[in-house]
Amino acid sequence: MSPTLIQWSSSQFAAFFLVMMRVAPVLFMMPLFNARNLPPLLKVGLTLTISLVLWP
């Protein structure tokens, strides 16, 4: 993997972080994802994936 793909500027990181902070509560409050039998790693992974899709 190219190192340029990993390097984010502070504004890009801030934008992604803000998108993730808006997506996470919505997912965690949904009844399907609020179940105790879902592993936390799955919830975090889904949050990151949806945030990457929605990130401008």
Image (cartoon, rainbow, N blue to C red):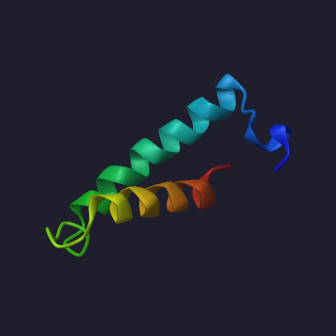
Q: Is residue 48 left or right of residue 2?
A: left
Look at 62% across and 51% down and name the residue there: 55
Q: Is residue 27 left or right of residue 35?
A: right
Q: Is residue 20 left or right of residue 16?
A: left
Viewer-nearest residue: 37 or 46: 37
Furthest residue toward left: 36
Residue 2 drawn at (x, y percent): 85, 45
Residue 4 versus residue 1 in the image, above or below: above
Viewer-nearest residue: 44 or 18: 44
Which quadrant would residue 37 be assigned to in this image?
Answer: bottom left
Furthest residue toward top: 10
Residue 12 drawn at (x, y percent): 67, 34
Look at 41% across and 42% down and name the residue there: 21
Residue 8 versus residue 24 in the image, above or below: above
Viewer-nearest residue: 26 or 52: 52
Look at 68% across and 49% down and name the residue there: 56
Which quadrant would residue 54 be assigned to in this image?
Answer: bottom right
Look at 49% across and 38% down and name the residue there: 18
Furthest residue toward front: 1
Residue 33 versus residue 22 in the image, above or below: below
Which quadrant would residue 16 be assigned to in this image?
Answer: top right
Q: Is residue 55 left or right of residue 35?
A: right
Residue 31 drawn at (x, y percent): 19, 72
Residue 19 versus residue 38 in the image, above or below: above
